[in-house]
Amino acid sequence: MDKRIFYKKQQKFGQKLKQLHHWNALLFTFLAFTGLILVSSEFRQWLPQVRIWVRDSHIWIGFISLLPILFYGPKLVKHLKTLRKRRNNRVNLYVVLFVLVALIASGLMLTFQRSLNPALSSFALITHDIMTWFGVPYLLYHSITRSRWFKAIEKRRAEEKQNKRMVIEEGNPVMNRRTFLRRGTGTGIALVFTPFIYQWAKPYLGIQSSSSSTSTLPLTEAFSPMPTPLPKSKPPIGGGRSGDFRYYTVTRMPDISDENFSFTIDGLVDRSKQWDWKDFVNLSREVQVSNFYCVTGWSVYDVTWEGIKLRDLLEKAGVQKKATHVKFYSQDGVYTDSLTLDQAMDADVMVAMLIDGELIPNRNGGPVRLIVPKMYAYKSVKWLNRIELIDEEHIGYWEQRGYSKDAWVNL
């Protein structure tokens, strides 16, 4: 890449296009790098604050990346005229523009997705995913094969070939070196991205992911007795969930079994309560069907949950008058969040144990998790093991790191 292209005042049309191309390549490289960080579970777990900074910089650079596209717009017609006899170059230009516009448009929708209907957010996320896992490798190939150093290699190889005066007869299967370089580059990029594409595509292909739980036993073997699903849970009255969960965690998943399980309600209550697994399983449960919304844009619809209404648990404990908020603790020892007392008393807020008639899996927050259907999922605390009534606002894990306190979904 010629660095002078960024500050040299260009006069010719071709040089202006080259300048825009270089700026766009730089911005796109930054977006691709930060985007890969954002989908990394390791960054979410070990460097959560850094992830927030990366997310914000990804969004701002995304806005800035609009500028080269806007500057290029008036030059598009003239550029296409210069390519009228070069069909492959025109097709390549259409593909690159389509990928860039789709990435930018879906990125803008995801940035402001809290103002959109969840269905639109899900569509934007799927579009962004497709453009990332298939469009980014193509644009990477496009950038590499049109870079100055790559063309210099091609030129040098061509000169060597000419000096050797190699004759390729018709039907000779020998591949010319320019084609070999380009195909080799494309193959290398494909090999790097294929494992990531496979992981992303597995839910859509119906392939079950192996459990990433750190527990030594699956929950069905780690807990006894197992809760017996109510008739409405199995088969699920909602018909079974539509969509797939994406599993995130900010810590190592806790090892939970019937031996170390406990569930506590304390704080500003008349009667502190604590249950072991056997007693908790015997609590009266209800069934509800609700949707599950993640703030990153994906949703799962018509999930059949079975558990105890939060307001019923609070009534058992007797909430004192000075209590204003309910604080929730995860058994991972790190994650917390809260609701106001009025929010906690909403009829569909549930301490859930079963999903579609099965014990909630560990990676999805089981055996017990909070479900707050009308709010984004960072309020629905995984591995819930303690509820505390308090008289002041508590700022939750992700809210401390930049998430909005207002978690209502725009339904």
Image: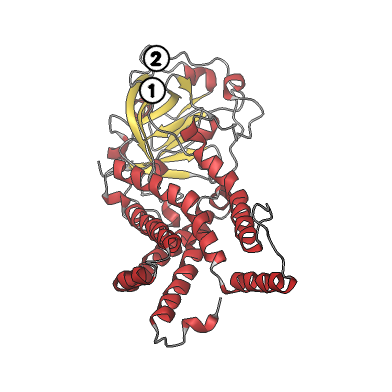
Amino acid marked by disc 2? Pro
The dot on residue 363 is: none
Residue 196, how many percent across, how many down? 56, 46
Task: Tell me: 285 left or right of 117.
Answer: right
Secondary structure category for the residue under label 2: loop
**Image quadrant for the N terminus?**
bottom right
Most extreme residue toward the right is 164
Answer whether residue 48 is visible to the viewer in this image: no
Q: Is residue 61 above or below residue 117?
A: below
Residue 357, how many percent across, how many down? 44, 19
Between 216 and 347, the one nearer to me in the picture: 216
Most extreme residue toward the top is 231
In the rendered picture of this protein, how many numbered marks are placed on residues? 2
Q: How is the image coloured?
A: secondary structure
Separation (CA) of disc 2 from disc 1: 8 Å
Amino acid marked by disc 1? Gly
Q: Is residue 350 above or below residue 25?
A: above
Q: Is residue 398 above or below residue 326?
A: below
Answer whether residue 187 is visible to the viewer in this image: yes
Residue 304, how many percent across, how many down? 37, 24
The dot on residue 240 is: 1
User: How many other residues sit within 10 Å of disc 1, few (<14), some (14-19) or many (≥20)?
Assistant: some
Q: Are marks 2 and 1 in contact (CB under 8 Å)?
A: yes
Task: Say which residue appears at 52% left-offset and 28% top-offset.
Answer: 361
Residue 282, how many percent across, how many down? 46, 15
Task: Tell me: 293 left or right of 18.
Answer: left
**Image quadrant for the C terminus?**
top left
Task: Tell me: 188 left or right of 291.
Answer: right
Q: Which residue is mark 2?
A: 235
Earlier-in-chain disc, 2 versus 1: 2
Task: Tell me: 299 left or right of 386.
Answer: left
User: How many other residues sit within 10 Å of disc 2, few (<14), some (14-19) or many (≥20)?
Assistant: some
